[in-house]
Each structure stands twice: as structure tokens, then as C-alpha cells.
Amino acid sequence: MSVQAPGYIRAIAPYQPGKPISELARELGLAESEIVKLASNENPLGMPESAKQAMLKEISELGRYPDGNGFALKQAVVNKYDVPMGWVTLGNGSNDILELAARAFLAPGDQVIYAQHSFAVYALATQAVGAQAIVVPAKDLGHDLPAMLAAITPQTRMVFVANPNNPTGTFVTHQEVEAFLSAVPAHVVVVLDEAYNEYLPPELRFDSVGWVKRFPNLILSRTMSKAYGLAGLRVGFAVAQPALTDLLNRVRQPFNVNSLAQAAAVAAIQDQDFLQRSFELNRTELDRMQAAFAGLGLRYVPSFANFVLVQVGQDDEAGMRVFNGLLKLGVIVRPVNNYGLPRWLRISVGLPEENSRFLEALKQVL
Ligand SMILES: *Cc1c(COP(=O)(O)O)cnc(C)c1O
């Protein structure tokens, strides 16, 4: 007899990551430096120098296990967000936080709600524990929070909300989120995924950490992979009240965040200068990219993050066609068929010269 796996595991469609630069360079016979990758919403400035220095200092300690409690990094989160240390959970990327939440709070058959066209990991985390996904249709490609609220039943245990959302770049205002949180029944855990929070313009920022103090069923998820520039190290964190935090930590691997990652994250989270430069570069280049799309007569979703979703054709092959055309020119972007968006592509905002190369290539392909 062959090995057995539950049907809900066999049904999982694997996550499709952005194509690696090294892979395309091999295929085209080009140097890696000639490839432009705008496919994974990474920080085009790379990692902060402060984080690099912190890692170099840490390297001689790698014979030892990491601090399983992540004291220094939690302290940095506490200082920045003014929450008690017992409210912080560290993750191997915020992907880990999403999975910890699913493992801690869901049993097979429980219902989980998330929006159509929202982040792919919600489906993966839900399916991995045998829970039942309830996918609520998007409104204007974004979250329809009133409809998500209406979808809650006595069997619902969790709702995932991405704000801003990936891959659409849409944003729901703090008034809408607050009204939603106030109305969600106490038996439902809300995971509010704010991976792109640092890219919001100042007038749209709001005190989501403050909500954690008011709503005992809220888990706030943040990442160091995007604006903080540490995607390769895998660091994220959750902020939630102690009862939820305690449960998240029961299913957490004891050493889930490695020593180099902890050291780098402590430095990066305090590096206000790097964060500001990342924000400003993104604002300028996002505006330029969106203006270029408008100039080409392309429909796009006005973005609140560090990427933009653009419609590249009127037929369901358009996304893959243009994606493949760009690849031949050494430009990697992200197809989003797996999100039910086959006419669209998601483009991460890069350095000015990278965006220019992408825009030139796009004109050529179209
Ligand atoms: C990129 C992303 C994450 C997580 O990334 P990690 O690198 O695992 O921290 C989480 N949520 C959304 C919506 C994202 O786009």
C-alpha cells in the first residue's frame, strides 16, 4: 500500500513564487545583472546597511541556538509600538504568523472567511488544517467587509483581512475596518495582515495596534520582508492580547526565527532613515508607473502598496502572453491567473532604472 495523506492535503495547489533571477539568466544565457525582477514585492533598495552590520556581529555566535523567546527583537517591537512584551509573537516571516494562527485556532471542518483575490497564503493555511474556506466575492477588486461580515456563521472561526491587499493593492479605510471589528462576534478570530502598512501615505495611517487593545479576538500581522528590506531572512511578528498570543506560541517551533534574522530585524526596525527612504522611493516611482500605464491607455488598480496590478489585455491569455514576452526581454513580473485575474499582471515597484526598463519592454511587447 502507498502512503496516505488526507484529501484536504492532496487538494492543495502549491504556492507559485516569483521566478528567480538566476533561473531566467540561465534560460536566456544572460548575466544575472542584466535581469530585472519586479515580481515579489521586495524592497528595491535591498536590505538596510544597519541590518547587515548587525548580522556580521552576530555571525560568530552561530554555533549556538537562537534566543527562542526573541527577547531583543520583541523589545524593539515593544519600544516601537508601545505594547507589552507578552502581546508579541515572532514568526519565520509573517507567513509563519498566518500558519500559526490557522494551527492554533482551526480544526478540520471549521469555516474560514477571506476575500476573492486576496493573498494566496490564506487558502494554503486554511487547507493545510482541513478547514473550510468561504471566499467572499471582491468589490472593485478589494475587500467587501460588509459582505464578509454577513458570511459569518456559528461555524466560522477565523477571518483573514489583508490591508492593503496583495495582489490587488486595494485598501479599506480605518473607519471601515473599525466598523467591521466592532461587529465581528467574539468567537471569530480576525487576522489583520498589514504587510504593506509602512507604504501607506501619512494621511491614511491609523493606530491599528490600538485596536488590539480594544478587540480581544484580533491578531495583527506585520512583516520585515517588504519596507524593511529583509525578505530573505524571514521575519514577521504578530501583536495580539495575551490569551491569543499564548495559544499562538503553543504551536510555534521553539526556534522559529534564526539568530541572524533576529539581529538584523532589531537593527532594521529602528532604522527610521531607511524606512523613510524606502517609502519616498516607492511613492515617486509608483506614481510614475501608474502615470505611464494611464499614458498607454491601460487600466490599473490605484495602489496603496509597493506594487501595482495592471490589465494587459482583453482575453484570458493576455496575462501569460505579456508575462512571457517580458521574460524574453529579461524582465520578470508576476502573472496572477492563480488569483483569478488572467488578464492582469502584478508589477512590483523597483528602482527608477528598473522601472524604466520594464516600461520600455512593456511597450515593445504590447
Ligand atoms: C508578502 C506578504 C506577506 C508575507 O510575507 P513574509 O515574507 O512571509 O513576511 C504577508 N501578507 C501579504 C499580504 C503579503 O503580500
Image (cartoon, rainbow, N blue to C red):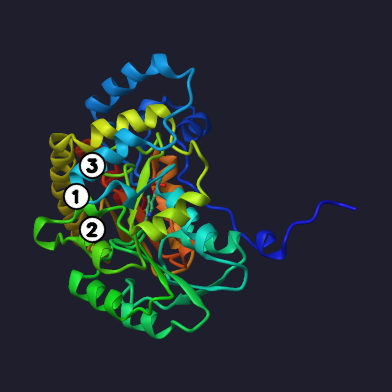
In the image, what residue type sits under mark 2?
Val
Going from N to C along the chain, the mark reached first, 2 or 3, is 2
Q: CA distance from mark 2 to mark 3?
A: 37 Å
Q: Please tell me which residue is depicted at 81% across the width and 51% down the height of the picture.
A: 3
> Is residue 278 visible to us here?
yes
- Place of residue 341 in the rendered image (x, y in percent of width and height, measured from the top left): 43, 66
Q: Nearer the viewer, residue 38 or 223?
A: 223
- Mark 3–mark 1 Cα distance, whole angstroms, equals 41 Å
Q: Residue furthest top?
A: 60
Above or below, 361 relative to 171: above
Residue 114 x, y percent position in the rendering: 43, 70
Which residue corresponds to the image point at 28% horizontal and 23% vertical from the top-left? Answer: 54
- The residue that appears at 60% across and 61% down in the rendered structure is 129
Residue 136 drawn above or below residue 311: below
Amino acid on which disc 3 is placed: Ser
Q: Which type of secondary structure does the marked residue at label 2 adopt?
A: helix
Image coordinates of residue 205 in percent, x first then y, are 15, 59
Task: Give the CA separation, mark 1 to mark 2.
Answer: 8 Å
Nearer-N-terminus badge (1/2) = 1
Q: Residues within 10 Å of mark 2 (few under 14, many from 20)?
A: some
Q: Quadrant of residue 118?
A: bottom left
Q: Mark 1 — residue?
A: 82
Q: Which mark is residue 14?
A: none
Quarter of the rendering occupied by the C terminus: bottom left
Callouts 1 and 2 close, C-beta under 8 Å: yes
Q: Which mark is residue 356?
A: 3
Check the image and name the residue furthest to the left.
203
Question: Which residue in the protein does label 2 denote?
Answer: 209
Classed neighbour count for the residue bearing mark 3: other residues with Cα under 10 Å, few (<14), some (14–19), many (≥20): some
To which quarter of the image does residue 257 belong?
top left
Front-most of residues 280 and 302: 280
